[in-house]
Amino acid sequence: MNAVTGRRGDVAAPPSRKPKRGTQKGPGRPEGTSVVRETILNAAEGIFANLGYAGTTLREVANEANVTQALINYYFGSKYGLFEEVFLRRSQIIADARTENLAALQASSDKPSVRDIVQAFLMPTLAFRDTAEGRSFLRLQARLHTEPPQISYQLRTNAYGTSTRDYVNALRAALPHLSELDATWRVTFMVGTYLYAFSDTHRMEEMMPPGVYDPEDTNDLIEQVTRFVTAGLLAP
């Protein structure tokens, strides 16, 4: 896959990447590799979430992480390499948890309910709202859908392609009247709904009178999203 560089997401040949992990030390290899990498990833996550891929520069990330740009290039090869690792380190956790949830659900019941399938899909993402870093990732994930296709398509497929297809198949088993096209559309709508609802858009605070809506009430959030999505999936 071609890498993406520059503030506008131009496509370029992938740069040579240094090994990301390992115990060997080479000339100039910094100490505390895992700590430094995590510091850079956390700093980049917040900036990418707020400014998007094109709006973020490595200089901004370096300043936030208190490292040099050269060190970022050493670990990640390019801005796109950094963006890719920022996205995949948490999205793969979500995808793995979804797969485990669905397997457990199918092992416990011959025909899981649509509501249970929906919650198995949503809960791994909801857990990320518990920390500031997790909320940054949710904003980044929502923003990914507005990034140029050469940035977003392959990343999204790598992270979620297999698990999302598994949920399409599970919903078709639960709702055999749905065609593959209909089931895929409805799962796509489920993704769009949770991305908006979970990513701190603050829309509800703007629309509701003070004291009526609690943005920290995750139980109500998951219940509202589950009801809405389940009803849509069950529609004729």
Image: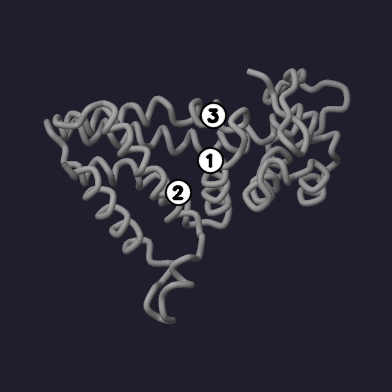
Mark 2 highlights which residue? 195
Q: Of marks 1 and 3, which one's residue comes earlier in the chain?
A: 1
Q: Is residue 22 above or below residue 171?
A: above
Q: Residue at x 64, y 46 (%)?
A: 45
Quadrant in which the C terminus is drawn: top left
Applied colour scheme: one colour
Residue 103: name its quadrant: top left
Residue 189 in the figure: left or right of residue 128:
left
Q: Of marks 1 and 2, which one's residue comes earlier in the chain?
A: 1
Mark 3 highlights which residue? 153
Q: Give 1 or 150, whichever is nearer the viewer.
A: 150
Please say if the residues under marks 1 and 2 sit with CB atoms less than 8 Å apart: yes
Mark 1 highlights which residue? 145
Q: Is residue 212 above or below residue 187?
A: below
Indicate the amino acid at tag 3.
Tyr
Marks 1/2: CA–CA distance: 10 Å
Q: Position of residue 162 (x, y in %)?
A: 39, 25
Element at badge 2?
helix
Q: Position of residue 164 (x, y in %)?
A: 37, 31
Quadrant in which the N terminus is drawn: top right
Marks 2/3: CA–CA distance: 16 Å
